[in-house]
Image (cartoon, rainbow, N blue to C red):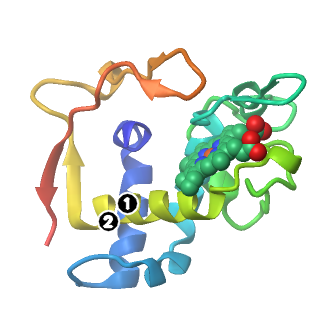
């Protein structure tokens, strides 16, 4: 949500996809999720830039955060561009593509990946489908902060406050 509110075009595309595909319903359910290619690209792009567990454990620490931003693997590595995962690119986070390893890779890869991915897709799909999102008061996109608390998993230092208005 932090990245989306700073990239209104991406937010709009994601919401249009959800609302065009689903039409008017009370909520999005798990069976709907395979239909949302752009939503999946948004989540992949977020996991590339902000892997929730940036340092993968093994005999050496693998810096998944730095790998996701390596200019040798990614064009415009610092930009939030989910389009990079549409059509022309079949890089996925399932452990076969070493450029994108938010769940780790190999024998110690996250065993919770399938359920984790479905939970994130379902939550984000419903947030974007049911509500339109804006910044409170006089806050500007440039004021949004991306600070994380240092640690084994990434947590935002400051909570993200947004205004939600019901879409339908
Ligand atoms: C989006 C959500 C999630 C992300 C990004 C994530 C990411 C990770 C990462 C990076 C690792 C370490 C891999 C390594 O050391 O190379 C890991 C390990 C692990 N994860 Fe997840 N995870 C998520 C959700 C879950 C869920 C929902 C569960 C359980 C239901 C889970 C269970 C585990 C377990 C048990 C390990 C340790 C595996 C081992 O050391 O052999 N994870 N996860």
Q: Which residue is mark 1?
A: 123
Marks 2 and 1, Cα distance to the nearest angstrom? 5 Å
The dot on residue 38 is none
Asked whether 63 or 80 is in front, the reply is 63
Q: Quadrant of the C terminus?
A: bottom left
Q: Are marks 2 and 1 in contact (CB under 8 Å)?
A: yes
Look at the picture and state if 27 lies above or below 131.
below
The dot on residue 126 is 2
Total marks shown come to 2
Look at 52% across and 65% down and name the residue there: 118
Does residue 101 show up?
no
Look at the picture and state if 163 lies above or below 20.
above
Which corner quadrant of the image does residue 137 belong to?
top left
Mark 1 lies on a secondary structure that is helix
The location of residue 155, given as percent across then percent down, is 45, 27
Mark 2 lies on a secondary structure that is helix
Look at 82% across and 53% down and name the residue there: 95
The location of residue 150, given as percent across then percent down, is 53, 14
The location of residue 94, given as percent across then percent down, is 76, 58
In this rendering, would 128 be left or right of 112?
left
Does residue 67 show up?
yes
Q: Quadrant of the N terminus?
A: top left
The location of residue 57, given as percent across then percent down, is 78, 30
In this rendering, would 134 be left or right of 46?
left
Look at the picture and state if 133 lies above or below 137.
below
């Amino acid at each position: 949500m932090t990245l989306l509110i700073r990239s209104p075009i991406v937010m709009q595309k994601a919401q249009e996809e959800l609302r065009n595909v689903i039409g008017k319903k009370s909520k999005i359910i798990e069976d709907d999720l395979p239909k949302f290619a752009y939503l999946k690209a948004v989540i992949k792009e977020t996991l590339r830039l902000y892997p929730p567990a940036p340092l993968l454990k093994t005999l050496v620490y693998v810096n998944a955060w730095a790998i996701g931003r390596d200019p040798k693997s990614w064009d415009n590595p610092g930009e939030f561009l989910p389009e990079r995962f549409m059509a022309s690119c079949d890089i996925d986070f399932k452990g076969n593509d070493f450029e994108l390893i938010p769940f780790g890779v190999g024998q110690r890869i996250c065993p919770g990946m399938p359920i984790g991915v479905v939970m994130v897709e379902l939550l984000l799909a419903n947030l974007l489908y049911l509500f339109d999102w804006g910044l409170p008061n006089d806050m500007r996109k440039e004021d949004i902060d991306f600070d994380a608390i240092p640690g084994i998993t990434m947590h935002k230092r400051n909570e993200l406050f947004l205004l939600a208005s019901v879409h339908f």
